[in-house]
Image: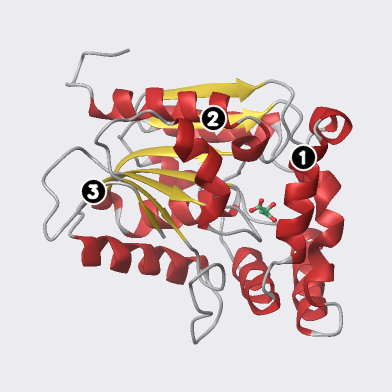
Amino acid sequence: MTELASVGPQHQGPLPLLLLHGFPLDASMWDDVVEVLGLQGVPTLAVDSPGFGQSEVPDGEPSLDLAADAVVATLEELGIDRVVVAGLSMGGYIALALAERYPERVAGIALLDTKATADTDAARANRLRIAQEALGEAGADAVAPMLTALLGATTLAEDPEVVEELRGRLAAAPPAGIAWGQRAMAGRPDRLAVLEHLTVPGLVLRGEEDEISTAADAEAMLTALRAGGGSAELAVVPAAGHMTANEDPVETATALADFWERCTAPSGATD
Ligand code: MLT
């Protein structure tokens, strides 16, 4: 977990920003964003999801509900009641589980390069195959083919540093975390209705070249958020794919900082 400003024992200051990473990465995928975030004095927490970074694979059936419970356990340890949560891809799925299970903890939700729908049968079967491969001889090689899908065409063609960094991260992904994460994502339900019941501000952000989370996925989340009556905005990051936080950390950080301001503005001061 990255902790940038002191919190606890019972946090009273500015609303913290909680960052949830994508699969099969860890909290450090947010480092470049955090560096340029510019939210002075705002506690910014990036937590490792179960099986990644410093976080152990939990006992029991893999489930993103458990991942959301683990986030809340961390918030409790830090004395934090409410957060503005931002989740990228798998982190977005966990943010949705958090919003469903602990709506009182969520002061705003930013959904980056993600979707609120469940997997198709084919996608679920593919996840279970990758989980099995990861636990076998392939290990982290099971996720190596994700590289070209995760990055946008522009990054792949023009930014070898980002490409190589992500290649290295995929190669270093822990096999047990890969398997746990794929099985947990395979079992996630459709959570569009969760967004329809939220009344807090929302941000839907996607890389223009993202082919994993599509424009239609983003539109569905926006529509659901607006149905709930909260203000919801769309941000599209040009020349980026699924990994906006790594492909364009400045644009992503700017959108998150603006969103945090929107979540914490006195009622009626924005929109
Ligand atoms: C991610 O970036 O977290 C993954 O692409 C999520 C997924 O496999 O659905």
In terms of sequence position, does the residue under pointer 1 or pointer 3 come before the other?
3
- Describe the element under mark 3 as helix, strand or loop: loop
C-alpha separation, residue under disc 1 versus residue under disc 3: 36 Å
Residue under circle 1?
A: 161
Determine whether 48 is above or below 166 in the image: below
The residue under label 3 is which amino acid type?
Arg
- Secondary structure, mark 2, is helix
Whole-percent x, y for residue 199 in the image: 30, 35
Image mark for residue 252: 2
Q: Amino acid at mark 2?
A: Thr
Q: Position of residue 3 (x, y in %)?
A: 34, 53
Q: On the rendered structure, is 253 left or right of 109?
A: right
Local packing at callout 1 (Cα closer than 10 Å; few below 14, some 14-19, many 20+) is few
Residue pictured at 19% horizontal, 37% vertical: 14
The residue positioned 50% from the left and 64% from the top of the image is 49
The residue that mark 3 highlights is: 82
Q: Earlier in the sequence, mark 3 or mark 2?
A: 3
Callout 1, which amino acid?
Answer: Glu
Of 124 and 107, the residue lying toward us: 107
Query: Closer to the N terminus: mark 2 or mark 1?
Result: 1
Quadrant containing the N terminus is: bottom left
How far apart are the two marked residues, 3 and 2, measured between alpha carbons? 22 Å
Q: Is the C-beta separation of discs 1 and 3 under 8 Å?
A: no
What colour scheme does the image use? Answer: secondary structure
Q: Quadrant of residue 170?
A: bottom right
Residue 115 visible, this orientation:
yes
Residue contact between numbered discs 3 and 2, judged by CB atoms under 8 Å:
no
